[in-house]
Amino acid sequence: MKIYHLNKKLFFFIFPLILFVSSVSHKFYVSTSVAEFLEEKKSIQVISQIFIDDFENALKLNYKDVLRLSPDNDPILIDSLISKYFNKHLKFIENGNVLNNIFIGREYKNDVVVCYIEVLFDSIPQSIKVRNTILFDFISDQKNIFHFQNGNMRKSFLFYSDNNTYMINLK
């Protein structure tokens, strides 16, 4: 009977504590990217989605002269800054060589900027390394979800500050 009484006291102490902790708003930081390897085009096409406010702050931190990310602002400057940022923070590495990202464009959907990138190969390698450090310089607990598709094979990766590189087989 004493155990039951102790458990009951513990329940009335812990349950409100759990309710309080779960009701406190916790902001999370996540970007998502979907990449598809197209063997016939010798390319990887990437679509990345990043929250606009976080991306604006990261661009300001890196390039100082960034404008607000919106369709009405200087598109040439914004595209240039986004392209530089992706070349620095989303790297595809083949045999130790960093491949050049080609920034295709961007669009805005609600509070997210959607960026389109392509990586071209001269010849198709066995595997590549992907290093994703998007927003790591701005947000310490940033997580980047990266879905990779190669034909019927689909793999998902979680990049975070201590684990920002994965090897992906293409053949």
Image (cartoon, grey):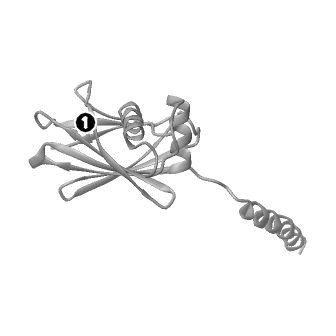
Q: Identify the residue under disc 1.
A: 128
* Closest to the observer, 150 or 58: 58
Point 59% across, 52% down: residue: 28
Residue in the image at 53% along x and 42% along y:
56
Per the image, label 1 sits on a secondary structure element best described as strand
Classify residue 21 by image quadrant: bottom right
Residue 25 image point, x, y percent: 70, 59
Query: In the image, is 91 to the left or to the right of 7?
Result: left
Relative to residue 136, is residue 97 depicted above or below? above
- In x, y percent, where is residue 116? 31, 48
Quarter-wise, where is residue 15 in the image? bottom right
Q: Position of residue 14 (x, y in %)?
A: 81, 64
**Residue 159: x and y, percent?**
44, 43
Image-quadrant location for residue 13? bottom right
Q: What residue type is labelled 1?
A: Ile
- Count neighbours of disc 1 (C-alpha within 10 A) and say few if under 14, some if 14 to 19, many if 20 or more: many
Determine the residue positioned at 51% across, 36% down.
66
Name the quadrant of the N terminus.
Answer: bottom right
